[in-house]
Every structure is written in structure tokens, then in C-alpha cells.
Amino acid sequence: MRFIAAVCIGLIILAGRLSPAILAQPPAVRVGADVVLTDGGVLAGRRIGLVTHSAGTTGDGRLTMDALAARDEVEIGALFAPEHGIDGSYGAGVRVPTVSRGRTPVYSLYGGVFQPTRQMLARVDTLVVDLQDAGVRPFTYASTMALVMRAAAETGKPVVILDRPNPLGGLTVDGPVLDPRYASFIGLYPIPYVHGMTLGELAALYNSAFGINARLTVVPMRGWERRMIWADTGLPWAAPSPGLVDPDIAPYYAATGPFDGTNVWNGVATESRFRVALAPWIDAPRLAERLNRYQLPGVHFTPSAIPYPLNGKVYQGVRLHITDPRIFRPSTTSVYILAEIRRMHGDRFRFRLSRRAPPLFDLVWGTGQVRSALQRGEPAEAIVRAWQPGLARFLRLRREHLLYE
């Protein structure tokens, strides 16, 4: 027993000695920011306008804006802040002010304007975008990127996208393709709710298929493969929005974020954020049992109950447990949850409608068909089946714009 204990202690000591070296191993993936910092070229001699935030980091955790500012061959003439601000401190939907970072102006692209003006661009000759996306259409960074590309096209300035991983991977494509009648800042172009593309790939798609026609360069990652989820990359995670505190939340956010516009709560502002579907009147055990009957890929449901932060009232329903993020289908799962709640509690399940048209739910989904089908009591299987032809067309369209295998 003493020998075994001594061996165990020795292994612990050895592990302790090795752990710094293990931690020092480079990530499996080099993001576009690392590639451009190493290879230079494309930005050498440029005075850039950098669109970035606190999740725009290098593989060793430095802010891209700081890493580029330290390079003699690149000058940052202006910074541009998306939703949540340059430091990620502003909540969802909160206007971001124009400020400065040292002597460099930080122009807001989520306040009075959403597209850089000619006055903002007077100090730069090249626009550079380094934003971490969440992999779903309503996340506003893809729209910010598209509007920056439009501004670049209108002013004749080149635009460079520093590519980053899609935290949902590059294989999952799910949900309805946006109907152009529902275009908004949370969805400008006809892509699915879950598109399975990186921002660099989306930029190439937007530029050619949707007629932006900017002088576009995408600096691709090295080592990234479509099958990869975030855990496979070896990269540090920096939250692209206040709620996405770790990469494991991304597929949950993709599934329950679309509850916006209903009276079903997804646990936002609690430690259960995006992992639950709750309301005061839901029969939690029954809902969990009925959802598990469908054997939806990559997810299991258990009853859950937590207090609502504003009033302490207990909300109950189901907790999602994603067992395999590679086969999990966020939009499909979302529809099954809502359809089952509608089936069980049709007299209490509601959409939050307002005088404005279209409703928030429709803007989030990019179509009015999902809400209409749920209101009619259509089964989830039929709702999911209805968006498959649009997905098939999108998959053919996106094929030529994919940068990675």
C-alpha cells in the first residue's frame, strides 16, 4: 500500500511539473488574426479601420486590436464597435456610444448608425473585421459585417475578414431560410437560422450571391475543419456577448434563443441561461416525458423548476441536456418544444404581439410560417418538413463559398 501511495504521489508531482508544458501547447487551430500577424502581407503598410470586440483575440488570448497596434507595419486609424461594445459590456439591444480608446476613435455601429459613414472612414484606407460569431442568423455580428462590406464597396476601400470558428461547427444546417420580407438587422439575407458557416464564408457568400461586390479578402484559419466544435480547436473562449459565458452554451442558445416573442422563458439572467424552457403553468414531468418520446438527436430532457429573477415566482418546464452537439439540431429541437407546449397548454401559450409588424418572433425566425403553424396546432414534424426545400437550395448555394473541408 505504501508503494502504491508513493507511486500515486510521484505521478501527481510529475503531472504538476508537466502541466505548464501541456498548457503551453499551441491550439489546434490558428485564427485569421494569428495568420495575419504571422504572415503580415495583406495589412502591411495599411491604415486600417478595425471592427472588433473583446472576443476578437489571438490564439494566446491577446486582443487583436492590441496585437495589431503593436505592429510597426500596421496603423489603426479607427476602431468600430458592434452590439455589446468594444469591451463587451453592453447588454443585448442596448445602444453603444461612440467613445475613444487612447487617441483612437471607437465609432459605434450599434447606436445611431449601423453602417460606417464616409466621415468615419476618412481616417482609414482598409476595413478589417475580426468578430466572433455564434453560428446563428439573428446574432447581429454577421449583419454588422455585411454593412461594413457595403460601406467598403460604396467607398472603394478593400475589406479584410479575419476568420474565426463557428462554435456550432460547420456541418449543422437547420431551421427556415429567411424570407426577404422579414429582413431586419437580426437577419439581412436569406440564410437558415443555423447556417453552418464561418463569418469568412458568409462574407464570401454575401459578397457574390447577394450583390455586395466589395473588394473582399478573407484570411482563413489554419487547422479548422467543418466537423470541429469549439472544444476541438484548443482556443481560449472569450464571450462574444454577456450571456455566452462559455462555448458549451452556444448550442443551447441556438435552441432556446428563438423563444423570444413567446411567453416561454429560457432562463436568461440565471445560471440556467438558455438551458431551460419554462413557464409558471407548464406540467414539467409530463412535458419532459413527451419530448423524450421523440428521441430528438443529441438531446435529452428532464423536469426543471427555477425562480424568475424579477419576482421570485417559480417557473417550471424542462431542462435540455445536449448529449452530442455534433448531431444536435437546434431549430428542430426548438420547434418540438414549442409545439409540445402548445399542444399541452394551448390556452396559456402565447406569442408576444405588438402594433409593429412583423412580430419579434417572426423576425427571429425570419418567417411568419413557423408562428402560423404553431398557432394552428400543426405537429412539429410538419413544421420542420416545410423548411427542408429551402435548406436544400441553400446547401447548393453555399457549396461554392466554403473555405474548409
Image (cartoon, rainbow, N blue to C red):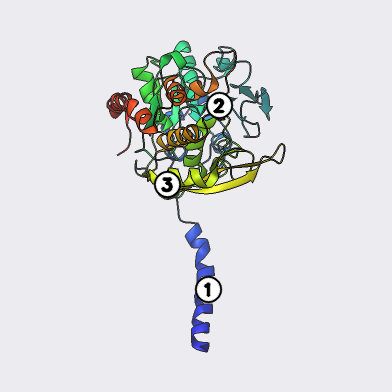
The label on residue 131 is: none
Residue tagged 1? 12
Residue at 44% across, 33% down: 335
The label on residue 350 is: 2
User: Which residue is more in the foreground, 325 or 114?
Assistant: 325
Q: Earlier in the sequence, mark 3 or mark 2?
A: 3
Quick check: 155 left or right of 348? Answer: left
Q: CA distance from mark 2 to mark 1?
A: 56 Å
Q: Amino acid at mark 2?
A: Arg
Q: Amino acid at mark 1?
A: Ile
Q: Residues within 10 Å of mark 2 (few under 14, many from 20)?
A: some
Q: Earlier in the sequence, mark 2 or mark 1?
A: 1
User: Which residue is more in the foreground, 400 or 250?
Assistant: 250
Kindly report which numbered mark, 2 or 1, lies closer to the viewer in this rendering: 2
User: Which residue is more in the foreground, 309 or 199?
Assistant: 309
Q: CA distance from mark 1 to mark 3?
A: 42 Å
Residue at 59% across, 16% down: 354
Q: Amino acid at mark 3?
A: Asn
> Residue 167 appears at what percent x and percent y?
45, 40
Q: Which element is circle 1 on?
A: helix
